[in-house]
Amino acid sequence: MLTISNAAVAAVKTIFKSGIKHKRTGVIVTGLVPNDNFQLNLFSSENPKHKPLMSAIDKLNSKFKSDKIKLGKCVTKDYRLNLRPISIK
């Protein structure tokens, strides 16, 4: 929390202009929790592979400046190989 306070004070110092009257200002910050503090689904267990996977996806998206890398959906359609001959004899 001290880091946020220091950043707020630094921001005020950069925008303050002498000779101009300023009123009190406040910042309210809520909902800050550590990265490892989140609620899991009651009926499923968290796969330990998810955190490194999500981290890798975030790094790639950050590197390429877009959300090109996304999680794929589960495929429900039945894709089977078409094994019939296609050449004419």
Image: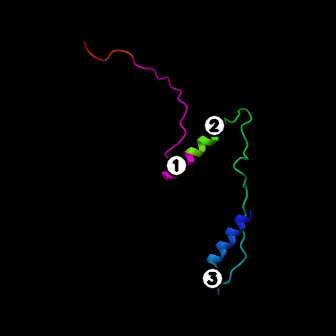
Above or below, 52 against 84 in this view is: below
Camera-nearest residue between 64 and 20: 64
Q: CA distance from mark 2 to mark 1?
A: 19 Å
Residue found at the far bottom of this picture? 19
The tag earlier along the polypeptide, 2 or 3, is 3
**The N terminus, quarter of image:** bottom right
By secondary structure, the bulk of the magenta-drawn segment is best described as loop
For the point 62% across and 76% down, the residue is 14
For the point 73% across and 58% down, the residue is 30
Residue designated by label 1: 61
Front of the two marks 2 and 1: 2
Which numbered disc covers residue 17? 3
Q: How is the image coloured?
A: rainbow
**The C terminus, quarter of image:** top left
Above or below, 30 against 78 in this view is: below
Range drawn in magenta: 57-82
Residue designated by label 2: 49
Q: Secondary structure at mark 2?
A: loop
Question: Which residue type does callout 1 highlight?
Answer: Asn
Residue found at the far left of this picture? 89
